[in-house]
Image: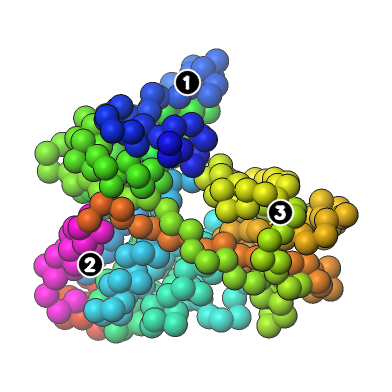
Amino acid sequence: MAQDAQTGKPAPGTTDAWEGLPDAQPVPQPGLQPLAALYAAVLRARNAAYDRGLKRSFAFDFPVIGVGNLRVGGTGKTPVVAWLAERLLRAYPVGTISRGYGRRTRGYRLLSGSDRSADVGDEPVLLYRRLSPLGGAVAVGERRVEALPALLLEREDLQAVLLDDAFQHRAIRPGLQLLCTAWGQLYTDDALLPAGRLREPATGASRADAVVVTKCPPELLAAHGAQVREALRERLELRPDQALYTASLQYGPMRPFIRGGTGGGSLPDQPDRVVVLSGIAEPGLFQAFARARFPNAELVDLAFPDHHRWQDADVARIREALDGAADPLVLTTEKDAVRPDDLDRRSLAGLPIAVQPVDLCFPEAGEGERLLEHVKNFVAGFGNSAEGRVKGSPEAKR
């Protein structure tokens, strides 16, 4: 029987009968509900100020697509941005703007090949490596409403811009809002911080034009796609005008880690010990993949907090975990692989490090095409996007 890669339990719906959605998990910190109620009051006041025009919010005469979430980390936003951008770039130039979480710099910055994750953030470097060969532009700016005009002044050829993780950035109003939520961690099954993991109440989903449920069990979608969508629409309490898309994550062939043109050690075909190295918000899916990929190997999980900046002491832990293995391997994520830039190159010498790429996929026939068509139709509604600018800048509207 197929298993849910996140829980290791049988995946609902993978048997002949539809078994329904997984039950909601208990609130992680129920004792903190009073603090969550205070936080909710602050957020309600903030959102009301934007809704009533007391705080300034700008829309643009240009195709701006927001991709965000309600939960803190781990919902698959960046794979959605990368998947959409790669396919839009086959038709016209597009760019992305991220906040650049954890970076040492401030303000707007258009990425170049020399930028390091410490300077611009992990996700922007990951996006740059995937999109720049296709002609895409990747920028960072904590104030997206200022970064967007700056990007369009530098890249006058762009026909659309995707905002990565900007759902709570109410100062800008994307023309199309895509909200991501992960299978087994739906926002309607969660609670507000600090009791749960929500950045804002689930009612904030009303601002979304479409919801993308990521990390769905692929066998489930292939066998019961229509029933899954119906159940998800009900659980997420979507309006009839809000579109719903279901997606999974797909791991590709692993590749050797290369840093500054220098690779690590050779990679064994059948390792006897695998160190599963991660510093991401939700490592469970990655760890489950490693267990399935290397069933005969001894696995050692080294999981660090999201956006963990690698130190030489961490490399020492990795070497210690590999000690005594005949054919060891270190398996890490694409996101983690952008971070060792600040390490002494000698500290990584000889380590057999493999990078595991991950992509968005749509097991149900036609689902990915529906999402892409939704976005393309939105962009097409602006006609020739370049004509919607004023001397290279979009016209902002309150």
Mark 2 = which residue?
Answer: 63
Q: Give residue 111's mark.
A: none
Question: What is the spatial separation of the Cα atoms under label 3 and label 1, in whole angstroms?
Answer: 32 Å
Q: Amino acid at mark 2?
A: Pro
The image quarter in which residue 145 lies: bottom left
The image quarter in which residue 182 lies: top left
The quarter of the rendered structure image containing the C terminus is: bottom left
Element type where label 2 sits in the image = loop
Q: Is residue 217 left or right of residue 313?
A: left
Q: What residue appears at the point 52 percent right and 45 percent down from the top-left corner?
A: 285
Element type where label 1 sits in the image = loop
Q: What residue appears at the point 47 percent right and 68 percent down from the top-left corner?
A: 127
Mark 3 = which residue?
Answer: 274
Nearest the eye: 264 or 181: 264
Please check the rendered image and state whether residue 233 is part of the magenta-colored stretch, yes or no. no
Q: Is residue 344 left or right of residue 370?
A: right
Disc on the earlier residue, 2 or 1: 1
Nearest the eye: 88 or 253: 253
Q: Amino acid at mark 3?
A: Val
Q: Is residue 275 left or right of residue 113?
A: right
Observer-side mark, 3 or 1, equals 3
Q: Residue 136 in the image: state x and y as whole percent.
A: 38, 78
Q: Which residues are magenta?
A: 366-385
Q: What residue appears at the point 43 percent right and 21 percent down from the top-left corner?
A: 37
Observer-side mark, 2 or 1, equals 1
Q: Give residue 26's mark.
A: 1
Q: Residue 144 in the image: state x and y as whole percent.
A: 39, 61
Question: What is the spatial separation of the Cα atoms under label 2 and label 1, in whole angstroms?
Answer: 39 Å
Asked if residue 8 is positioned above or below residue 164 in the image, the reply reads above
Q: Residue 153 in the image: state x and y as whole percent.
A: 35, 80
Disc on the earlier residue, 3 or 2: 2
